[in-house]
Amino acid sequence: MRWILPSERLPEAWFNVVPELPAPLDPPLHPGTRQPVGPDDLTPLFPMALIGQEVSSDPWIDVPGEVLDVLRMWRPTPLVRARRLEEALGTPARIYYKDESVSPAGSHKPNTAVPQAFYNKQEGVARLTTETGAGQWGSALAFACALFDLDCKVYMVRASYEQKPYRRVMMETWGATVEASPVDEPDHPGSLGTAISDAVRDAAGRADSHYSLGSVLNHVLLHQTVIGLEAKEQLALAGEERPDIVIGCCGGGSNLGGLALPFVPDRDVDLLAVEPSSCPTLTAGTFDYDFGDTAGTTPLLPMYTLGRDFIPPPIHAGGLRYHGDAPIISNLVKSGRMRATAYPQGKVFEAAVQFARTQGTIPAPETGHAVRAVIDEALRAKEEGRERVILFGFSGHGLLDLQAYDDFLGGRLDQG
Amino acid sequence: MRWILPSERLPEAWFNVVPELPAPLDPPLHPGTRQPVGPDDLTPLFPMALIGQEVSSDPWIDVPGEVLDVLRMWRPTPLVRARRLEEALGTPARIYYKDESVSPAGSHKPNTAVPQAFYNKQEGVARLTTETGAGQWGSALAFACALFDLDCKVYMVRASYEQKPYRRVMMETWGATVEASPVDEPDHPGSLGTAISDAVRDAAGRADSHYSLGSVLNHVLLHQTVIGLEAKEQLALAGEERPDIVIGCCGGGSNLGGLALPFVPDRDVDLLAVEPSSCPTLTAGTFDYDFGDTAGTTPLLPMYTLGRDFIPPPIHAGGLRYHGDAPIISNLVKSGRMRATAYPQGKVFEAAVQFARTQGTIPAPETGHAVRAVIDEALRAKEEGRERVILFGFSGHGLLDLQAYDDFLGGRLDQG
């Protein structure tokens, strides 16, 4: 069963959680002076509209009409009740998922790629640079740049560039140029941190170019709140007063934030972040100021971090292999408003395959983390004989990650 | 702009075009006796419910509730107005597409895979066999068998088996077993015809198994008519009285039939089949009785054919590489109710990339054929200064066909 809102019910304002946070959000610091960064520090990289959103404390921020027009190409996305999964588990829990895999790029990432491309175009920027790991974000920005007629340069972690040629082809089909990172060390497998350094360096060095980030920052999470805003309205259509728990996988935090932030004011809704055991930022990291990239070129962000030099093992959920976490997510976890848990990838793929065989859609490995936690919550509800309403974010499909499923089904997957 | 119907507007009966055909449909013949085949000839391969549908002349046939429940996982599918493509072309035409790429398997194929799995399950069959070329059909049947707890064996054309490992992984993720065909000639690249022979031979030899076909037959096209029935209702919502032309790519004919058959009674709606120049069944074949497979194990079907020994060149639109065509489609073309046209694949990929860069979604190579014809119709409307309403079938996405895009963008595509 699916609940789909008509086009005109697409949220026309983004929800800004900042005024609702349990504790004030610490500002990003300049790495040299350790003073809060100002707009002047950021204008070489971002348009003023996004810098304004990054520091805004307005509770709602209007979505421009041109952005709405593009989002309506696939939004509102469906809210789906996972009845077949419920039946397979024999759980009294009612499981709903918000299906962000229906976007042209196959994930939630275009929700922020589109406004970022729009604001840059509006301020006369001709070219955007970015990094991509698993490829979801690079694909989304390539798609958005095609629609707004911007050039797009994607620095792709070399290991992915070589192992996932189809992600590169997808970006090139939308007109982007893709280069393996690090650009100056052809034998280095690369990491998200090195690719960010390459992309920032490129944009900072060219007057026609800006840089675009697909997660972590406040304005990125802000753009993603359309997910949770729609889900609230759809749950009401489904006859649910509220979810008992909201679950999302968490790498940089944009997918989880997009779904969960609109529920922050609803104090009795449990919020759960799911991350890989091999990159346990929220569950085993420390809360501190740290750089967003490996080279130390970004401002210092207040977040849970494993250290900017942390190189996660090459697990298949590349979108979750990040040493830090969004300051907003870190704030919520630190204050106790959000919980976090971690799973090894073997258990994740077990859950992802069970989902595919009951609900049809094959989850991205990142999404599989949320599915794992959902199944465990539903089984707990069964043990306890409790009705529970579970809402989770189906952040993306796994059609460009089938190598990982082949490894799992063939018994070749590192279980860790 | 998209028009989406609520779940309860999913059509509850399939439209049977047979009573509306301009000329009576010739029956399939037994290859030995050349007499019309009877149910007894077909029961080793198909359940009675499908045999009944194959020969029915009822104008409407009810969709079972269990089938509706599954189809509602992704249906009704969106009708989308391709405004950005219209703008890029500067055409006065209004272009709408019915987006079948949103199914879990990524194409229209599950519309018939689901009822076929259901009827077989209902009659106590434990296992289905089938063939697949490009992989769209095999994926759809693997998905449907997972939902109805049936074993599934897919014979995959060896060339595709080796070149498209991700399609195989997709089927295996849903629990199917996949084997390269022909099974007894490991050096043979295979063809759809040889794979059909392998699958039929397997099913005929085992009491627990039936065979399932993804196109060509009357019951397959019948199941696909949900596409056109929904599109009619959605066009009305969009304020259109009727389309001037309905366009679909055509291999065996199930995608085109699904969209176009409900428009057959609307005499002023032009119907257009689009096929590859390299496998020009409707535009250069002869209308005759021919076998559905290479080995000559199937009944003889009245259809346009290039001869069952015709081996099409290895173009990327594997789903269109079939020597014959559905008897229903052949009947419509022969009587003049439907037109056909053919395009070389270089022109097809040019159109597919233009679609991806304006509308976002990357078309399957098969779907690209329809897009090519749509663009040419829209440009003709521009030349003639005529408003035209164009409806086409977006039969599937190309996310598992990105190698073809890489070849095109890299200048390595055979243009023919």
Image: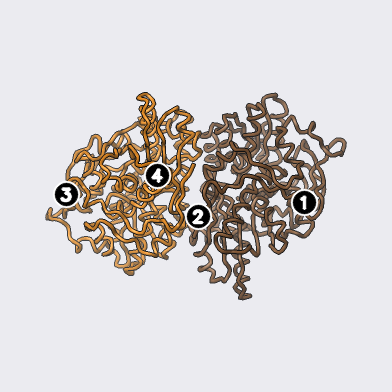
Chain colours: A orange, B brown
Alpha carbon distance from label 4 to label 3? 30 Å
- Horizontal side, residue A187 vs residue A35: left or right: right
Marks 4 and 3: CB-CB under 8 Å?
Answer: no
Q: Secondary structure at mark 1?
A: strand
First reached walking from the N terminus: tag 4 or tag 3: 3
How would you rate the neighbour count of disc 2 (Cα within 10 Å): few for under 14, some for 14-19, many for 20 or more?
A: many
Instruction: Identify residue for label 4.
Output: A235
Q: Sequence order check: which comes first, mark 1 or mark 2? A: 1
Mark-to-mark CA distance, 4 and 1: 51 Å
Q: Mark on residue B294?
A: none
**Local crowd size for mark 3, using a 10 Å CA cut-off: few (<14), some (14–19), many (≥20):** few
Q: Amino acid at mark 4?
A: Leu
Is A119 displayed left or right of B273 in the figure?
left
Give how far apart the Cα atoms at labels 4 and 2 are: 28 Å
Q: Position of residue A328 (x, y in %)?
A: 24, 47
Q: Nearer the viewer, residue B328 or B412?
A: B328
Mark seen at residue B361: 2
In the image, which is nearer the foreground, mark 3 or mark 1? 3
| Nearer the observer, B157 or A301 | A301
Is the same chain shared between marks 3 and 1? Answer: no
Tag shown at residue A24: 3
Which secondary structure lies at badge 2?
loop
Residue assigned mark 1: B304
User: For this rendering, which residue is in front, A322 or A102?
Assistant: A102
> Compared with residue A156, is residue B296 higher up or lower down, i.e. above or below?
above
Element type where label 4 sits in the image: helix
Q: Secondary structure at mark 3?
A: loop
Mark toward the viewer: 2 or 3: 3
Residue type, numbered disc 3: Pro
